[in-house]
Image (tube, helix red, strand yellow):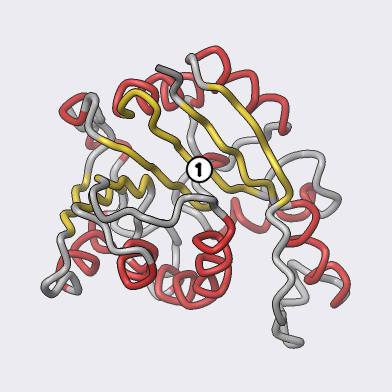
């Protein structure tokens, strides 16, 4: 059952923040989709954990059409916006923290800059293992970890703008949690090499070189495979 205390209207304390976040994430989502090795999703059921306003699943469907997509999030107004933008795409969106109804349901799962906000990483890893089919793969991206040079400042900045508490974890913490849950864990740099807006927020990026190095070097892409 969903815990109502953990449901928010939006992730950001400023409601327009979720819209701005989706717009800023779009080029990184495209890189994410192009980076993963899977190309044919036509028979696959997909999960976007932390789907927010549904932009990632809509982009994924446009680039790699899939059989069915499920988006899960705890931001109720953002999920409502995602549902209203579904059109004829095979998408469903749910406001929930309970993954138990989806046991053994997904071939491929994604999360983008979500895991660092989860208060119970061990529980998340175990639940994700349960909802993946044998041989399924969960791709999780985050650059928000304590080996990222800007993290001490970011932890404060994000904490001031997020309805969800920010967690302080290392890359090894993620590896350990997902390994303990049963996943075969591998990781690579996210490696984004596209153009970065020269007007990137200087609160987060004191130098343009910070804005370039963060998505290329410090943002991590975890590949979590459920072995048969």
The image shows residue 72 at horizontal and vertical percentages of 28, 47
As drawn, is 11 to the left or to the right of 2? right
Residues 170 and 176: in front is: 176
Q: Which residue is mark 1?
A: 139
Q: Residue at x 21, y 47 (%)?
A: 95
Q: Which x, y percent locates residue 181? A: 48, 15
Instruction: Say what secondary structure mark 1 lies in.
Output: strand
Identify the residue at horizontal 67%, vertical 58% (top origin).
157
Looking at the picture, tell me which residue is in the foreground, 55 or 38: 38
Compared to residue 218, the image places residue 60 above or below, namely: below
Left or right of 218 in this view: 91: left
Counting from the top left corner in percent of width and height, residue 187 is at 67, 37
201 is higher (above) or lower (below) than 188: below
Is 192 placed left or right of 100 in the picture? right
In this rendering, is residue 86 above or below 157? below
- The residue lying at 45 percent from left, 19 percent from top is 227
User: Above or below — where is 60 with respect to 172?
Assistant: below
Q: Position of residue 219 (x, y in %)?
A: 70, 52
Which quarter of the rendered picture does the C terminus lie within? top left
Q: Quadrant of residue 166?
A: top right
Q: Residue furthest front?
A: 40
Examine the rendering and report whether any part of residue 64 can be seen: yes
Is residue 53 among the parts visible in the rendering?
Answer: no
Q: Crowdedness of circle 1 by 10 Å Cα count: few (<14), some, many (20+)?
A: some
């Amino acid at each position: 059952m969903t815990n109502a205390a953990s449901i928010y209207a939006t992730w950001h304390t400023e409601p327009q923040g979720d819209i701005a976040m989706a717009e800023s994430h779009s080029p990184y989502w495209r890189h994410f989709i192009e980076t993963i090795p899977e190309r044919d999703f036509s028979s696959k059921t997909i999960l976007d954990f932390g789907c927010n306003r549904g932009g990632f699943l809509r982009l994924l469907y446009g680039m790699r059409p899939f059989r069915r997509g499920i988006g899960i999030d705890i931001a109720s107004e953002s999920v409502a916006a995602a549902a209203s933008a579904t059109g004829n795409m095979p998408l469903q969106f749910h406001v929930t923290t309970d993954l138990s109804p989806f046991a053994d349901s997904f071939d491929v799962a994604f999360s983008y800059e979500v895991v660092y906000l989860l208060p119970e990483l061990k529980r998340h890893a175990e639940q994700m293992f349960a909802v993946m089919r044998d041989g399924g793969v969960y791709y999780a991206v985050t650059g928000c970890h304590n080996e990222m040079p800007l993290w001490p400042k970011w932890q404060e900045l994000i904490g001031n703008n997020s309805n969800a508490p920010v967690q302080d974890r290392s890359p090894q913490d993620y590896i350990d949690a997902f390994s303990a849950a049963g996943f075969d864990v591998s990781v690579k740099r996210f490696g984004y090499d596209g153009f970065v807006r020269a007007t990137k927020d200087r609160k987060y990026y004191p130098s343009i070189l910070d804005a370039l190095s963060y998505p290329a070097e410090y943002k991590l892409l975890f590949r979590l495979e459920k072995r048969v």
